[in-house]
Image (cartoon, rainbow, N blue to C red):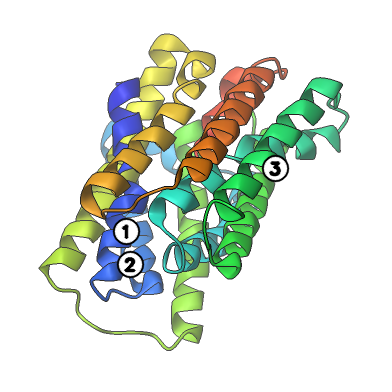
Amino acid sequence: MAILSSVAFSLATPLGKFALNDGLEPLTLILWRFGLAPLLLALTLAWQAPEKLWLEWSRGRIALAAGLINGLGVICFWQAVALVDASIATVLFALAPLFVLAALALRGEQFTWRQLVRLALGLSGVFLLVGPGGQVNWVGVLLVILAIVAYTIEITAVQWFLNDQDTRTVTLYVLVGMWLTIALGWLVGGADTTIPNWKGWLAIIVLGVISTYLGWLLMFRAIQMIGSGQYALLLPVETLLAILWSYLWLTERLRPLQWAGCLLILISAVLAVQRLGRVRNRRRWRTWLRPTR
């Protein structure tokens, strides 16, 4: 189940890029995706555990606020995917664990020299990936970084304030908050009403049903069986799969120096995930290490 969920999540960026290359607007794509996924999750909870549909308002507003913030991150990420290769955007997002560690340091989590090494590896990887390795749109890179910042705010807020709540319920509220932000962005951006063609609908269905809804449900079950620590170690596998799909479907190619940058970023991500495994109360909150892109 853990491997299947990683495969499901790895499809998101390459398939989204495929739809964008075919003319679908980024905001239209994510509006449908993040509208479909919470609807299916709500229906599943209503069938399996209807009592899990509700959070008390003091908790629910935190989850919604986290989703509203990460909704901005999702908008930034998919606008970035429209500007840079899907493989590059995916690898850059693998820096997220480093940002999470930095945020945890603000709340007293020890920041060690090992984390400085991880940071140096990650930044060196970014330099090789977007610098001498090739000409990359820096606006796209900045948008990915903003997406990581928004994601970090979401994940740490959930850890600090919603650690004792059912993850499925919190996920539902966060996804609803994300959709609200995306819907507002869609309206502000001109409310594109273009009907997607069959390729666009295929991408929307796969992203909403497989990469978001089924991916999260498989992840929940896998974590129950093997623990979040073991599951989180698959994050670099997801990144590599996403690069593979981009290579096969989008004919994207990375130069040797860019591959070296990818390797440094993945090593940094693995080391950061191992460090996150020692954070107290990790079994609950590390579910949120999954980027909702």
Q: Residues under labels 3 and 2: Cα distance?
A: 31 Å
Q: Residues under labels 1 and 2: Cα distance?
A: 8 Å
Judge whether residue 165 can be spotted in this image: no
Q: Which residue is mark 2?
A: 29
Query: In the figure, residue 203 lies in which quadrant?
Result: bottom left
Instruction: From the top left corner, tell me how far across and down residue 239 is, in percent.
Output: 43, 36
Front-most of 224 and 124?
124
Q: Residue at x 53, y 43 (%)?
A: 257
Q: Earlier in the sequence, mark 1 or mark 3?
A: 1
Q: Residue at x 26, y 53 (%)?
A: 251
Q: Would you place residue 263 above or below residue 199 in this image?
A: above
201 with respect to 28 (left or right):
left
Amino acid at circle 1: Gly
- Give the residue furthest to the top: 226
Q: Residues under labels 1 and 3: Cα distance?
A: 26 Å
- Please identify, in this view, whether the residue under mark 3 or under mark 2 is nearer the observer: 3
Q: Which residue is mark 1?
A: 16
Amino acid at circle 3: Leu
Mark 2: which secondary structure? helix
- Please identify, in this view, whether the residue under mark 1 or under mark 2 is nearer the observer: 1
**Which quarter shows the N terminus?**
top left
Q: Which residue is mark 3?
A: 123
Amino acid at circle 2: Leu
Label 2 crowd bin: few (<14), some (14–19), many (20+), radius 10 Å: many
Instruction: From the top left corner, tell me how far across and down residue 79 is, in percent.
Output: 48, 68
